[in-house]
Amino acid sequence: MTTLYAEAVRLKLTTGTEVEAFARVAHGAGRRPKCLLLHGNPGSLQDFAQLIPRLARAADIAAIDLPGFGKSTRTAPNPEALNLTKLAEHAIAAAHALGWREPIFIVGHSHGGGVAQVAAARFPDRVAGLVLVGTLGACAHASYRLLALPGANAVARALGRSLRASRLSRFNRAILRRVMAQLFAPEPVPEEKLEHELELLASRPEILSSMVHVALGRPCAELLRTAPDIRCPTLFVHGSNDAVVPVKFARTIHERIAESGGVTEFHVLQGAGHMLVHHQAPELVDLIIEHLGVGETRSSVARDRATC
């Protein structure tokens, strides 16, 4: 598996934190779109290993570990430090730290799609366009309802302790495989991805608490509330067989943007699940590159497309 961390750097942000970042910029290639990639929950910049080589042909690319995930530490232990608004502020600050002063495109997967949406609503002058991949949507899906239950963080901390116990390695692998099978369905879990996540969670079990904290504070309700504020061209890409965030949850946000006069398009990949960044990378990159050329002349009428 291509390891992006070998070339990653630490970015100091004006928000007072640091994040791990991977960037691929073509020097001397003229003016190119700037594209920031935001992972889901859980996730890391490594999730975009298949997208970046293809996408870098058309744009300058950066992927970051959001605070509390991957190799980026948290700014504070309280759940509010990981709400959508705070994460959106960190994302925009990361673009600034990269020297990207012009409006950027943001590609967000799953929870990262929620962060991207809030960033566009709160910082319209900084966001040129959105691609929301298997995005969080509204209302809250089953996983986020479970993570928001009382005691979820205690369970997460207990699981974190077990991940550090080598004698439980077989048990931990079986548990993680079962959880990841739900995320990757209907496609198989790549073995290298399973091993990467086991290693990461064993070294940084606090990520499990971050998983709980980002689901608190009714983030999906916030997405529904902020959707009318999005004025940049927005592309939704969703798998028809997404069992984590069903299509209708993302379509709710798409329709809310359209109702408010926004430029939005909904693209369904037939037979695909939630982890489009892994199993549908070529098709996804083609759609993203097409979207990078979207301009102000684009019709404001919402469009729905499906591919087989």
Image (tube, rainbow, N blue to C red):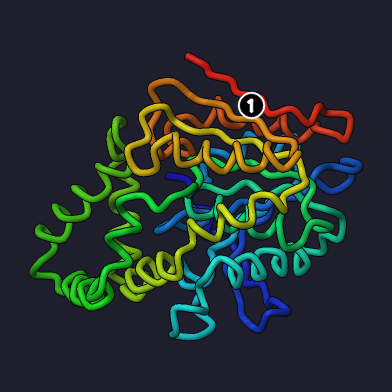
Q: Secondary structure at mark 1?
A: helix
Which residue is more in the foreground, 43 or 103?
A: 103
Circle 1 residues within 10 Å: few <14, some 14–19, many ≥20: few
- Quadrant where the N terminus sits is top left
Amino acid under disc 1: Asp
What x and y, as percent, mark residue 301? 74, 27
Q: Residue furthest front?
A: 259
What x and y, as percent, mark residue 35? 71, 48
Which residue is more in the foreground, 154 or 252?
A: 252
What x and y, as percent, mark residue 147? 31, 64
Looking at the image, residue 250 lies above or below residue 81? above
Looking at the image, residue 246 lies above or below residue 71? above
Residue at 49%, 62% in the rendered image? 219
Residue at 59%, 30% in the rendered image? 266
> What residue did someone put label 1 on?
286
Residue at 61%, 69% in the rendered image? 85
